[in-house]
Amino acid sequence: MDKETLLREIIDRIATCTRCGLCEHRTQTVPGEGNLNARLFFVGEAPGREEDLSGRPFVGAAGTLFTEILKSVKIDRKDVYIGNIIKCRPPDNRTPTMAEMDACAPFLLAQLQVVHPKLIVTLGASSLSYFLPEREIKITEMRGKRLQWEGGITIFPMFHPSYLLRNASKAPGSPKALTWDDIREVRRIYDQSE
Ligand code: URA
Ligand code: URA
């Protein structure tokens, strides 16, 4: 089967999923979107209010900042794939539980298998903790490092854009300044992966 059909099937399964309690609160699922052949795959945590209403990832305030970060290195959203560990909005945007992540992550793994990127950029601590469950995650120490994952895929952790909205300083060494360094490094890895 071609990638489009495979991804469509995954998205259809997500749409009717009742594996965890989050399904009771959703307006709709937010499966993720982007280029089926993307070499670069961004993984956030979970949809917020705007995403739940629109069915698309990263379209609220954090999403606007995320899109700006991409634009700063001329990465277009339509050239990459953008998804989340969790496909339904947690009530009041609370952090998803491990049980919810375990229930939902098989969908992300299936999406990763189909798209098969060279580079996964995790956004925030929850997303990274899913990929590195055995390690104590300190996002401030892990961000900006290239890590090897399964199948020769590189993982590159970055801060979550919501965290940057709460920490607006652009002073040297601030989360925002570091993020603008990190996205330039993502651009370099991306260019090398051609
Ligand atoms: N935050 C996320 O982690 N994902 C989204 O899709 C939107 C906000
Ligand atoms: N804590 C998080 O969960 N994510 C960040 O990006 C920073 C701190």
Image (tube, grey):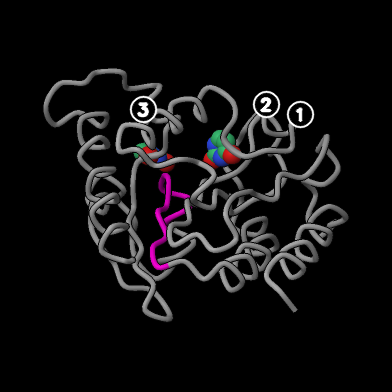
Which residue bears the numbered disc 2?
50
Mark 2 burial class by Cα count in 10 Å: few <14, some 14-19, many 20+ = some
Q: Earlier in the sequence, mark 2 or mark 3?
A: 2
Q: Earlier in the sequence, mark 1 or mark 3?
A: 1
Q: Under tag 3, what secondary structure?
A: helix
| Disc 1 within 8 angstroms of ligand 1 (CB) | no
121 relative position to 53: left or right: left
Q: In the rendering, which numbered label is found on residue 15?
A: none
Could you give the CA–CA distance between mark 1 and mark 3, rounded to whole angstroms?
A: 23 Å
Please state which amino acid type lies under the numbered disc 3: Leu
Q: Under tag 1, what secondary structure?
A: helix
- The residue at the point 33 percent across, 60 percent down is 136
Q: Is residue 109 above or below residue 99?
A: below
Q: Under tag 2, what secondary structure?
A: helix
Mark 1 burial class by Cα count in 10 Å: few <14, some 14-19, many 20+ = some
In which of the image's four quarters is ligand 1 placed? top right
| Disc 2 within 8 angstroms of ligand 1 (CB) | yes
Residue 90: x and y in percent read 68, 39
Which residue bears the numbered disc 3?
164
Look at the image and give the residue range highlighted in magenta: 118-128
Q: In the rendering, which numbered label is found on residue 53?
A: 1
41 relative position to 32: left or right: left
- The residue at the point 40 percent across, 68 percent down is 118
